[in-house]
Image: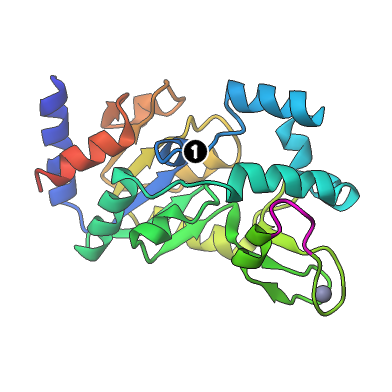
Amino acid sequence: MTGEERIEQFAGLVRDSRNIVFFGGAGVSTESGMKDYRSEDGLYNTVRQYKVPPETILSRSFFYQHPDVFYDFYYHFFLDTSAEPNRAHFALAKLETMGKLRAVVTQNIDGLHQRAGSQNVIELHGTVTKHHCPVCHTFMPAEEIRALEGRVPKCRKCGAVVKPDVVLYEEPLDEEVIRRAVGAISSADLMIVGGTSLAVYPAAGFLRYFGGRAMVLINRDETPYDSMASLVFRERIGEVLSGVMGKI
Ligand code: ZN
């Protein structure tokens, strides 16, 4: 099949679906210019600058032991960015408006889906758009965190270090979020998976709940689930989804 024929086939699946669920990972955000700390460059630079790998910095124990290092890294990788939603985010928001897409399940924490207009976004790893005091649960607006430019935010009520509403390494996923993700995936008729290699737990585990008609996979590299998919695209996800939107 040519690329054009595969896009046409994908568009046909979308036309026949009323309950699409999108499951996405880092690749969706990197097309918006978000820095990817898991990429070779990100990893190399982090270790050189901070002397520890990003997974260590983004762990619960490290957060409490070295909040100053954590917030410096967090600010540079997640808050100090001019990233804007891209064609993939906008296509998914449009599919939801059209009544075709029920939910976006994402491993990303940047809030770009919501900025593109998506309403039902299930954020498996939380979000950098919200921060709370872990002691007294006082909310701190993201603008205040950003204004600190990487310095440690303190709770205005009790003085404790404020924590992003992000699931750190060593922390479990939120049970209510898991329940919503499983509910959406298990009732989907078409599953679109994009920008994730599906190599890392728990991402791959969620796909087990899908029992719908077809799965479409869009990822630069091969994934363990390619053989389960009706269609596989190696092209950029923004390009593929906007191509599809032009045909439905
Ligand atoms: Zn507090």
Picture layout, residue 38 above or below residue 174: above
Picture layout, residue 59 above or below residue 126: above
Asked if residue 68 lies left or right of residue 205, the reply is: right
- The percent position of residue 128, horizontal first and vertical second, equals 60, 56
The image quadrant that residue 246 belongs to is: top left
Provide the residue designation for mark 1.
26
Assign ligand 1 to one image quadrant: bottom right
Q: Is residue 208 visible?
A: no
- The percent position of residue 176, horizontal first and vertical second, equals 59, 66
**Residue at the spot x=60%, y=65% of the render?**
143
Residue 150 among those drawn in magenta = yes
**Residue at the spot x=52%, y=56% of the render?**
123
Magenta stretch mostly in which secondary structure?
loop
Q: Is residue 62 visible?
A: yes
Residue type marked 1: Ala
Q: Which residues are magenta?
A: 148-153
Categorize mark 1 by other alpha carbons within 10 Å: few (<14), some (14-19), many (20+): many
Looking at the picture, tell me which residue is in the foreground, 179 or 52: 52
- The percent position of residue 116, horizontal first and vertical second, equals 35, 57
Asked if residue 46 lies left or right of residue 156, the reply is: left
Callout 1: SS: helix
